[in-house]
Structure formats: structure tokens, C-alpha cells
Amino acid sequence: QVQLVESGGGLVQPGGSLRLSCAASGRVFTIYTMEWHHQAPGKERELVAQITRDDRITYSDSAKGRFTISRESATNTVHLQMNSLKPEDSGVYYCHTYTFANADYWGQGTQVSVSS
């Protein structure tokens, strides 16, 4: 199994920045992709950014140009740098991973609130 623990959420004003982190533990050698998903209040969870083991990166249209996903192999941690935050970026951000064994795991989520 893989365990994921997110951190870094909080309250920020529109236009501000936050950096989310997701620390993986357990059978990390089985991880193929790590992702960040966003769930706004009353809406479905949506993929924001993904990074594969060989560092291929994809972003949602709303994240392009504002968010940056990165990976620290030494610590099995994935970061999401979020800049130019908007109120619609508010919600819970979840870390998610797929493994080579076709299993997937979710973190508990971290709350982001963008408000003046």
C-alpha cells in the first residue's frame, strides 16, 4: 500500500500563492503517477495536475500558467505551487496516486480558501 499525507493548505487573498505538499510512504517504488485533484464545494473532484515517474506533466486548463507541479524523488514528495489564486480555486485539494499494480490511493485532503 501507499499512504499519502497532504499539507500546505490555508486561507489566502485573491492573487496570492500557496504551496501544497504531498508526502508518500509505504510501497513508493510502485508509484507510477502522482496527481493533485480539486473539489470545490458542491462539485465533483477534478484533476488539476499530474506528474509521472518519468516526469511527464499535464495540467488542467484552469491550472495552466498559474500552477506548477514538481516532484522530489529523495523524499517521495510532490508539490503544487499555486500562484495568482482565484476564489474559484477554493476547496479541498487531494493527492492521488496510481501504481504499477493498477491500484490507486487518496490522501485525506487539504483545505484551500481564497477570499478577501
Image: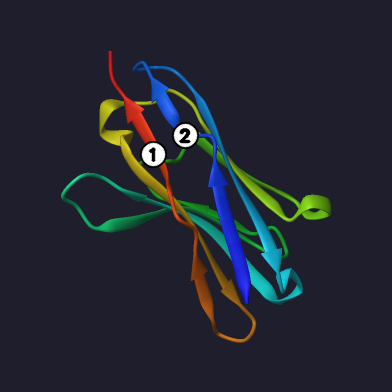
Residue 115 location, x and y as percent? 28, 20
Q: Is residue 70 left or right of residue 86?
A: right
**Quick check: marks 1 and 2 in contact, CB under 8 Å?**
yes
Identify the residue position indicated by label 1 in the image. Answer: 111
Residue at figure coordinates x 30%, y 57% from the top left: 45
Residue 115 position (above or below residue 101): above
Numbered mark located on residue 9 in the image: 2
Q: Which residue type does callout 2 highlight?
A: Gly
Residue farthest along the left direction in this orientation: 42
**Residue 87: image location, x then y, percent:** 27, 27
Percent of width and height locating residue 17: 49, 23
* Quarter that holds the C terminus: top left
Q: Quadrant of residue 16?
A: top left
The kind of residue on which mark 1 rests is: Gln
Which element carries disc 1, helix, strand or loop? strand
- In this figure, which colouring scheme has been used for the structure? rainbow
Label 2 element class: loop
